[in-house]
Image (cartoon, rainbow, N blue to C red):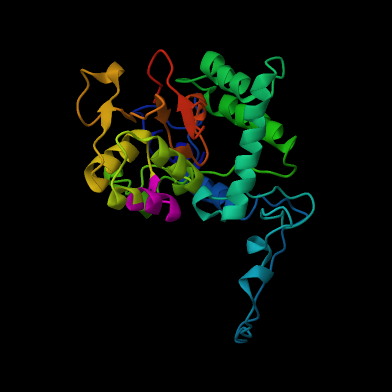
């Protein structure tokens, strides 16, 4: 919202006009005041306290633990609690979440995936994805409020199974993502990248035909042991070819005419199954279909 009020990208007129749409521009000083209010946790008059420091009296230095500061405290459910009763809870940066916090988020997603067995349950992941596919508002003033309401309902569905769970936010302007050269940055959060589990690595090694050499086997097991992450299945299999030296993989037949950089790969195994890696938190309906470690070869190639 602040970027929109300031007329910064993507609200600089290139994709969207500056906020408010159809209204009078907000003065820069007022935008700064709104930004400060948001950063302070959106306090109301009852929780705002003016503090005046007496001139000439230096402040007394005190040492405290970070965990004792309310802003950084962690509630029993693994999420930062509200500073005081009645104040909004703070969302977490997904790149700053701990492994237990991420696992709790994954559990919530998995419960929605499980609901896909009950098509009439509006909370199942497939129904939620179809809402966005068929009804999402883009390119006009309903873009922001519609998606805000959509994410709020999705979060409530997660909370049915993981009470208090909050959807994190993704700050893609962090230095790790190299906004000035995004193709050379992290691309997506590490928690969203795929990795090979140790169980899946053993299954993969047992199924590969021809069998990998001892060195190749060791290298594949190391991928799982060290939890090396990949931005896509394509990058995983290309790593296996280029870095490990196991070349018994072929391009996806659906992309026979695609460029080498965009051609997907799959592995050939003795039992005729495709071997897939496991996404940490699948980003959309297509990726959830490939969250299974080993999936049988369908009549058509799998979607990326």
Q: In the visual, does 92 lie left or right of 70?
A: left
Please tell me which residue is depicted at 22% across the width and 21% down the height of the picture: 258
Q: Main secondary structure of the magenta part?
A: helix
Asked whether 127 or 21 is in front, the reply is 127
In this picture, which residue range is highlighted in magenta? 218-229
Seen at 62% across and 34% down, the residue is 110
On the image, the x and y values in percent for residue 116 come to 64, 22
Q: Is residue 274 above or below residue 182?
A: above
The residue at 49%/51% (across/down) is 95
Residue sitting at 33 percent across and 28 percent down?
A: 268
Instruction: Left or right? Give the position of 80 relative to 21.
Output: right
Residue 246 lies in quadrant? top left
Q: Where is 253 relative to 70, above or below?
A: above
> x%, y% of residue 235?
31, 38
Task: Name the spot of residue 225 as percent of width and height, x first.
Answer: 44, 54
Taking the image as shown, residue 214 lies to the left or right of residue 291, namely left
> Residue 11: within the magenta?
no
Q: Position of residue 287 (x, y in %)?
A: 47, 29
One can see residue 220 in this view: yes
Tell me if residue 160 comes above or below residue 185 in the rendering: above
- Left/right placement of residue 270 relative to residue 166 reads left
Residue 195 visible within the image = no
Whether residue 220 is in magenta: the answer is: yes
Front in this rendered view, residue 60 or 74: 74
Q: Quadrant of the C terminus?
A: top left
């Amino acid at each position: 919202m602040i970027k929109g009020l300031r007329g910064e990208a993507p609200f600089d007129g290139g994709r969207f006009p500056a906020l408010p749409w159809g209204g009078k521009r907000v003065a820069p000083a007022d935008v700064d005041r709104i930004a400060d209010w948001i950063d302070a946790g959106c306090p109301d008059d009852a929780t705002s306290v003016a503090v005046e420091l007496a001139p000439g009296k230096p402040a007394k230095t005190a040492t405290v633990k970070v965990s004792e500061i309310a802003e950084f405290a962690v509630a029993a459910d693994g999420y930062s609690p509200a500073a005081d009763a009645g104040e909004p809870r703070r969302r977490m940066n997904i790149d700053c979440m701990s492994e237990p916090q991420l696992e709790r988020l994954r559990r919530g997603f998995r419960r929605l995936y499980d609901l896909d067995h009950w098509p009439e349950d509006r909370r199942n992941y497939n129904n939620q994805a179809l809402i966005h596919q068929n009804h999402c508002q883009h390119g006009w003033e309903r873009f922001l409020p519609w998606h805000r309401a959509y994410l709020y309902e999705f979060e409530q569905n997660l909370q049915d199974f993981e009470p208090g769970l909050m959807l994190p936010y993704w700050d893609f302007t962090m230095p790790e993502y190299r906004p000035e050269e995004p193709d050379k940055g992290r691309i997506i959060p590490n928690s969203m990248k795929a990795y090979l589990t140790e169980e899946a690595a053993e299954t993969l090694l047992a199924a590969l035909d021809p069998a990998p050499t001892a060195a190749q086997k060791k290298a594949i097991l190391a991928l799982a042991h060290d939890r090396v992450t990949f931005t896509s299945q394509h990058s995983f299999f290309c790593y296996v070819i280029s870095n490990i030296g196991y070349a018994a993989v072929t391009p996806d037949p659906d992309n026979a005419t695609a460029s080498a950089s965009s051609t997907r790969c799959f592995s050939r195994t003795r039992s005729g199954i495709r071997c897939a890696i496991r996404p940490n938190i699948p980003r959309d309906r297509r990726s959830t279909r490939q969250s299974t470690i080993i999936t049988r070869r369908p009549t058509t190639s799998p979607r990326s």
